[in-house]
């Protein structure tokens, strides 16, 4: 029975990893749509988003099966229950990529971003995709040390977000209120995307060790 549990849990973690890959790809395409005013890419992200909902339902069904058939206890139960939280985190990442694509579509054929902030979003998009792929790797490996390292990678996104606000708060901002609102919302979407990737890493740490990252730091 233990072998069956391990095999089913590995399948489930692989599915969660593929979901992270999917949302990373969504954000990559959404960012290109944003930067290039590409309507086709925007529509592709929007139309493909339903596939994530199907993957989420599949992951939750597999988790319920493990609960029902394997009668897990202690650490095994902790890992399965965390699955539902992980699905929620990944779903939110997908929703944020969808928001970016919808902003790009709404402003088409115009470009959403003033030239002054384009570089910020190029880098924020790159970081977001890297974080999603890092989350994919730690979900599949269940290596808590890699998960702890991934949590630190969020600092660069936070720095970019703070610098972006410095630009927006400049009294000489020449692009108007609508552009400021778009940039503010988009910056928040990327920041929250990164936060959810970090939450995934934190949950992997808890799955693997039974301790939160903060508790591990105290022990260390």
Image (cartoon, grey):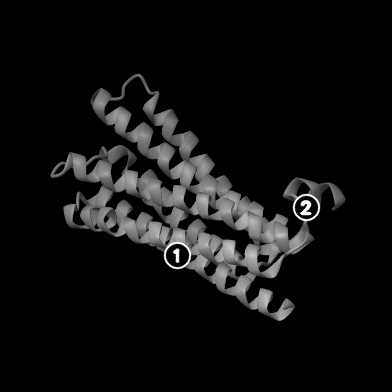
Q: CA distance from mark 2 to mark 1?
A: 26 Å
Where is residue 98? Give x, y as percent: 33, 48
Specify the farthest residue to the right.
219
Specify the farthest residue to the front.
68
SS of the residue at dot 1?
helix
Kindly identify the residue that appears in the image at 39 percent across and 47 percent down.
95
Where is residue 79? Give x, y as percent: 68, 60
Kindly identify the residue that appears in the image at 42 percent across and 35 percent down.
164
Q: Closer to the camera, 47 or 118?
A: 47
Q: Residues within 10 Å of mark 2 (few under 14, many from 20)?
A: some
Which residue lies under the disc numbered 1? 21
Left or right side of 176 for 162: right
Q: Which mark is residue 211?
A: 2
Q: Residues within 10 Å of mark 1 (few under 14, many from 20)?
A: many
Kindly identify the residue that appears in the image at 20 percent across and 45 percent down.
105
Q: Earlier in the sequence, mark 2 or mark 1?
A: 1
Counting every numbered tag in the picture gives 2
Task: Using the rendered image of the protein, determine whether residue 54 is visible from the camera's viewpoint.
Answer: yes
């Amino acid at each position: 029975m233990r072998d069956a549990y391990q095999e089913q849990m590995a399948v489930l973690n692989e599915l969660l990893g593929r979901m992270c890959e999917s949302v990373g790809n969504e954000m990559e395409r959404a960012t290109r749509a944003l930067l290039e005013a590409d309507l086709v890419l925007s529509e592709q992200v929007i139309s493909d988003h339903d596939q994530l909902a199907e993957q989420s339902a599949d992951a939750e069904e597999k988790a319920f099966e493990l609960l029902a058939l394997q009668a897990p206890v202690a650490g095994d139960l902790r890992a399965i229950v965390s699955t539902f939280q992980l699905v929620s985190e990944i779903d939110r990442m997908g929703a944020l990529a969808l928001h970016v694509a919808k902003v790009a579509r709404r402003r088409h054929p115009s470009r959403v971003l003033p030239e002054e902030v384009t570089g910020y979003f190029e880098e924020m998009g790159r970081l977001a995709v890297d974080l999603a792929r890092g989350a994919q790797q730690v979900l599949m490996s269940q290596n808590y040390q890699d998960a702890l390292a991934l949590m630190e990678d969020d600092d660069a996104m936070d720095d970019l977000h703070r610098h972006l606000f410095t630009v927006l708060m400049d009294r000489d901002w020449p692009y108007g209120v609508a552009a400021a609102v778009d940039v503010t919302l988009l910056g928040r979407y990327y920041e929250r995307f990164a936060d959810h990737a970090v939450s995934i890493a934190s949950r992997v740490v808890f799955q693997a060790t039974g301790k939160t990252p903060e508790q591990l730091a105290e022990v260390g």
